[in-house]
Image (cartoon, helix red, strand yellow):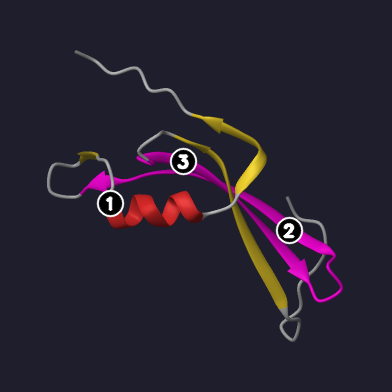
């Protein structure tokens, strides 16, 4: 969502928070806020993602390091766990 113009000379701060995630962080949604120097919100970007095994060409669970990094991200006040139905 665009709110304010960002010019080339503007200094901006980008924050990130987790909106949704599976317990293993294989799938997730992040929200980024782009803030100008006066703390005015210039843009809000939501990103949905998942990790992929490039050899198997299938969605995969990230390794322990990546999961630990994601666990340290701040969580949105409206944070939700994603429940995935697994095929047997």
Q: Are marks 3 and 2 in contact (CB under 8 Å)?
A: no
Residue occupying the point 45% across, 49% down: 71
**What residue does disc 3 label?**
28
- Labelled disc at residue 48: none
Relative side of 46 to 24, left or right: right
Question: Residue reaching furthest bottom?
Answer: 9
Tell me the residue that label 2 is attached to: 43
Q: Where 25 sits versus 10, above or below?
A: above
Disc 1 crowd rating (10 Å Cα; few below 14, some 14-19, many 20+) is few
The relative height of residue 83 versus residue 34 in the rendered view (above or below) is above
| Callout 1: SS | helix
> What residue is shown at x 83% (from left), y 68% (from top)?
39
Please state the total of marks drawn on the protein image.
Answer: 3
- Does the magenta stretch mainly form a helix, a strand or a loop? strand
Categorize mark 3 by other alpha carbons within 10 Å: few (<14), some (14-19), many (20+). Answer: many
Q: Quadrant of the C terminus?
A: top left
68 sits left or right of 40 in the view: left
Residue 56, located in which quarter of the rendered image? top left
Q: Magenta residues?
A: 25-53
Above or below residue 69? Residue 19 is above
Residue positioned most to the top: 88
Q: Position of residue 49 (x, y in %)?
A: 43, 44
Q: Element type at marker 2?
A: strand
Per the model, the C-alpha gap separating discs 3 and 1 is: 16 Å
Q: Which sits earlier in the primary sequence, circle 3 or circle 1?
A: 3
- If you read the primary sequence from the N terminus, does the residue marked by circle 3 or circle 2 appear first? 3
Q: Is residue 6 left or right of residue 57?
A: right
Q: Quadrant of residue 58?
A: top left
């Amino acid at each position: 969502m665009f709110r304010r113009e960002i010019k080339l000379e503007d200094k901006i701060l980008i924050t990130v928070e987790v909106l949704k995630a599976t317990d293993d962080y294989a799938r997730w949604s992040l929200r980024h806020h782009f803030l100008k120097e006066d703390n005015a919100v210039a843009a809000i970007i939501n990103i949905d993602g998942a990790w992929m095994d490039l050899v198997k060409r299938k969605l995969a669970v990230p390794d322990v390091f990546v999961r630990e990094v994601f666990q340290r991200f701040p969580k949105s006040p409206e944070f939700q766990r994603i429940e995935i139905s697994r095929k047997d």
